[in-house]
Image (cartoon, rainbow, N blue to C red):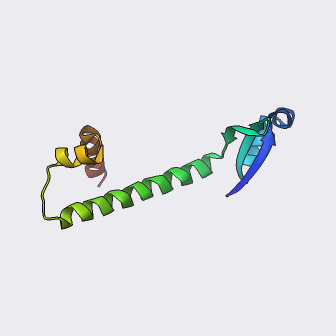
């Protein structure tokens, strides 16, 4: 993805509309004294990033489940969540939500 660095002074002269249009091409990184201070991105790119993150998370959880299932040791959901540092309540909520969608 293309990234454009824009100093804050130039960004203020460009205006919000121009920055939003530029963000359709890729991330716009606003800088102050050469340091990144903010990022402007399009909703489409944000959705794509979130989708990729969700897919990666699912792959990691699938791999963890494969490892756990191949050990022969059976753990309860609570024990598994505790070992993985995952909130068991949230896992149960997501399971119900996915079941209701299917």
x, y percent for residue 57: 40, 54
Residue at x 18% of width, y 46% of height: 79
x, y percent for residue 27: 69, 49
* Residue sitting at the far bottom: 70
Q: Is residue 80 above or below residue 16?
A: below
Q: Is residue 23 above or below residue 7?
A: below
Q: Quadrant of residue 10?
A: top right
Q: Taking 58 as reference, is 36 left or right? A: right
Residue at x 19% of width, y 63% of height: 69
Residue in the foreground of this view, choosing between 86 and 21: 86
Residue in the foreground of this view, choosing between 60 and 33: 33
Quarter of the image that includes the N terminus = bottom right
Q: Taking 93 as reference, is 51 left or right? A: right
Residue at x 47% of width, y 53% of height: 53
x, y percent for residue 59: 38, 61
Callout count: 0
Q: Taking 61 as reference, is 30 left or right? A: right
Q: Is residue 81 above or below residue 66?
A: above
Q: Taking 91 as reference, is 2 left or right? A: right
x, y percent for residue 102: 29, 55
């Amino acid at each position: 993805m293309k990234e454009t660095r824009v100093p804050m002074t130039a960004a203020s002269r460009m205006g919000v509309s121009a920055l939003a249009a530029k963000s359709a091409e890729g991330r716009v990184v606003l800088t102050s004294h050469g340091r990144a201070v903010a990022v402007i991105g399009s909703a489409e790119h944000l959705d794509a990033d979130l989708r990729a993150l969700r897919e990666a998370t699912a792959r990691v959880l699938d791999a963890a489940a494969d490892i756990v299932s191949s050990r022969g040791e059976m753990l309860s959901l609570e024990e598994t969540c505790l070992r993985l540092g995952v909130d068991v309540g949230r896992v149960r909520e997501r399971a119900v939500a996915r079941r209701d969608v299917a």
